[in-house]
Amino acid sequence: MPSPAAPAYKRVLLKLSGEALMGEQTYGIDPAVATQIAREIGEIQAMGVQTAVVIGGGNIFRGVAASARGMDRATADYMGMLATVINALALQDALEQQGVVTRVVTAIEMRAVAEPFIRRRAIRHLEKGRVVVFGAGTGNPYFSTDTAAALRAMEIKAEVILKATKVDGIYDADPMIKPGATRFDRISYLQVLEQGLAVMDATAISLCMDNRLPIMVFNLRTPGNIKRAISGEPVGSLVTA
């Protein structure tokens, strides 16, 4: 039996949308989907890859949408941050049921349910082989969880952001709407910004560009894709300099 290939990355940050946890539901968390994601994270953890996760909250509450309907933007964003903590706890539970030791670390202090974010402590958890799930975004309103993912990835010195989506990469148009859309295997940060491609918001892309942090965009719904991405297989689109 051939020995498994050495992982292409030693430390990664996985960015999950809150919607990833919904499965086919229209709201909330599907435990079966959380278990499937946890199983895949467990696989790469077993390969010796240090794994951090940033998760969104859109399956429970979306601050931007609420502010568009008249709610104060800062208040709406704080509510969205709290939603991400609910998701982080659900993912922690799913991971620990797979035997993966996990720590939830939040940007807003809530010591009864999670640790406050202390950079060196988070890195220590990773070095000890624990999965670290970052909740509550950056702790500031007006910043998306994509920006939180970029920021945390820099802070923990991750080698790549794995951006899990519903499609198998970056296209020049929405492939769900335009069947003939062209997929990019590789694309520069500048192209993403200039063409207004919906990869991550502009703040997150700029942060990655300034610090030369690659972003791999891939389809989370294909089983085994996280492991393939870690192994360096071409599973999606890579955003680089």
Image: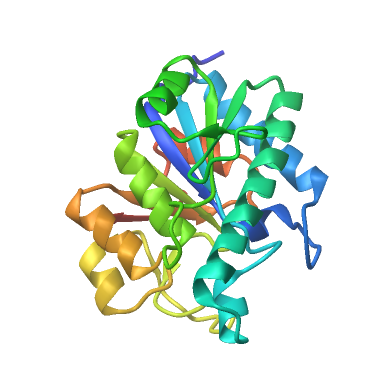
Give the residue drawn at x 60%, y 78%. 65
Q: Position of residue 239 (x, y in %)?
A: 31, 57
- Foreground: 4 or 72? 72
Dividing the picture into quarters, in which one does residue 205 lie?
bottom left
Q: Position of residue 90 (x, y in %)?
A: 72, 41
Identify the image quadrant of the N terminus.
Answer: top right
Residue 188 showing in the rendered view:
no
Give the residue drawn at x 28%, y 73%. 193
Residue 140 showing in the rendered view:
yes
Q: How many labels does the image show?
A: 0
- Foreground: 25 or 134? 134
Q: Is residue 112 above or below residue 1?
A: below
Q: In this view, does 2 lie above or below 224?
A: above
Q: Position of residue 135 (x, y in %)?
A: 55, 45
Dividing the picture into quarters, in which one does residue 183 lie?
bottom left
Give the residue drawn at x 62%, y 54%. 82
